[in-house]
Amino acid sequence: MSKKDYYKILGISQSATDIEIKKAYKRLAIKYHPDRNQGNKSYEEKFKEVKEAYEILSNSEKRSAYDKYGHQAFDQTSSNNNFHGSYSNTNDFGDIFGEVFGDIFGDGGGNREERGSDLQYELEINLEDVVNGVEKEIKIPTLKKCNFCKGTGNRKILDNNKCYTCQGNGQIHVRKGFFTVQQTCYTCHGKGKYIKDPCYKCNGEGRISTIRKLLVKIPPGINTGDKIRLSSEGEAGKNNSPNGDLYVIVKVKKHQIFKRKKTNLYCNIPINFSTAALGGTIEVPTLNGKIKLKIPKETQYGKLFRIREKGVTSINNNCLGDLICKIIVETPVNLNDNQKKIIFELGKSLNKSNGNKNSPKYARFFYKVKKFFENLRRYKI
């Protein structure tokens, strides 16, 4: 009787990858395994077909021969056969878990290193630090390698930590009738290591608590929420396992003068009425000192002045942002009698003159108001 196509048996295409072959076998092997279907001869035969197909297609050489010659590649009478009698007929369910499940989901074995935990530290810095860059010393509570046992966890440093039950594998195989079941080692709990005589200082963990000082370099241009990763500066792992990482999360304090938007800085510059009307020169603060800014005559409230390259350095391309100054014309307060008289006379002079000339915004606004009421009366008629 002719045999079925191995690809059709597993329900896969001829271009299927190794992982796809293994997944198909896993699914069908569980479905048709005799132990789950005791007394069902058809399922037992189907399981044998599935296992035979898997053992051929999972082997690159056998699969290549099968693709070229079909089932004749494994016929002992065929002149092309170099592979006859090479596959196993075992029905051990443990083989499925060990060979297929482990490949797809990981080896399932023990002896895994317990990497130390990552740590986070929030660091507050000033805006001045952002502009210039700075180095900050921080103190973090962490776990470090035990000096007494050198991180081994053993009272005697030369003792071997290898678990005697599982021989360092972390897993043991228990035979239960027809099954071979893989279980986590009950001695080392899957770690592959067992410490008979723990270090009295670290209780066998190989690490102890400490307060650690670190110098963190803050680059120019960093912003709130940015993280600086310090590799292997986190907690020490158990029993000489690798350290975790330290993540320094930056928080820039609110500045009393400047506001930051990306690489630009913004600030409000108050000037008096006289300077706004007649012009002048004022001093403007920057994060690197004071500079002089020329105010042209007749400067209006809200006027923006851009001072090039007095902002923050971009952390991406090192380009400098700008400082944007907004002019705030301040109304004078706490006037004495003489000052009041001068302003009163100025007001009289402005009212007598052509308003369009001295106060163009004022004149335009009330012209619009006048037109609005004229139109309103027209609609009512």
Image (cartoon, rainbow, N blue to C red):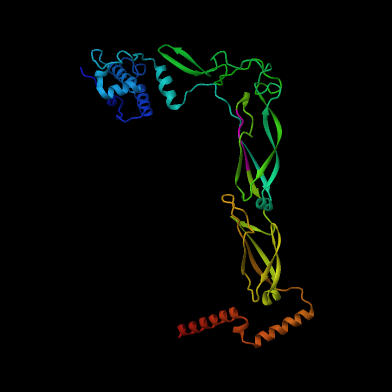
- Residue 99, compared with residue 267, is above or below; it is above
- Give residue 348's position: percent from left, percent from top: 69, 86
Quadrant where the N terminus is found in the figure: top left
**Is 134 or 228 nearer to us in this picture?**
134
- Residue 24, compared with residue 126, is above or below; it is above
Quadrant where the C terminus is found in the figure: bottom left
Identify the residue shown where x is 35% and y is 26%: 21
The count of marks equals 0
Q: Quadrant of residue 254?
A: bottom right
Identify the residue shown where x is 61% and y is 70%: 303
Furthest-bottom residue in view?
Answer: 352
**Image position of 250 (left or right of 101):** right
Q: Quadrant of residue 257?
A: bottom right
**Image position of 243 (left or right of 275):** left
Furthest-right residue in view?
Answer: 337
**Is 271 or 132 nearer to us in this picture?**
132
Q: In which quarter of the image is residue 73?
A: top left
Identify the residue shown where x is 31% and y is 25%: 10
Residue 231 drawn in magenta: no
- Give residue 219's position: percent from left, percent from top: 64, 47
**Is 60 or 361 nearer to us in this picture?**
60
- Give residue 28's position: percent from left, percent from top: 34, 24
Identify the residue shown where x is 68% and y is 50%: 129
**Image position of 45 (left or right of 242):** left
Which residues are the magenta region?
Answer: 242-248
Furthest-left residue in view?
Answer: 1
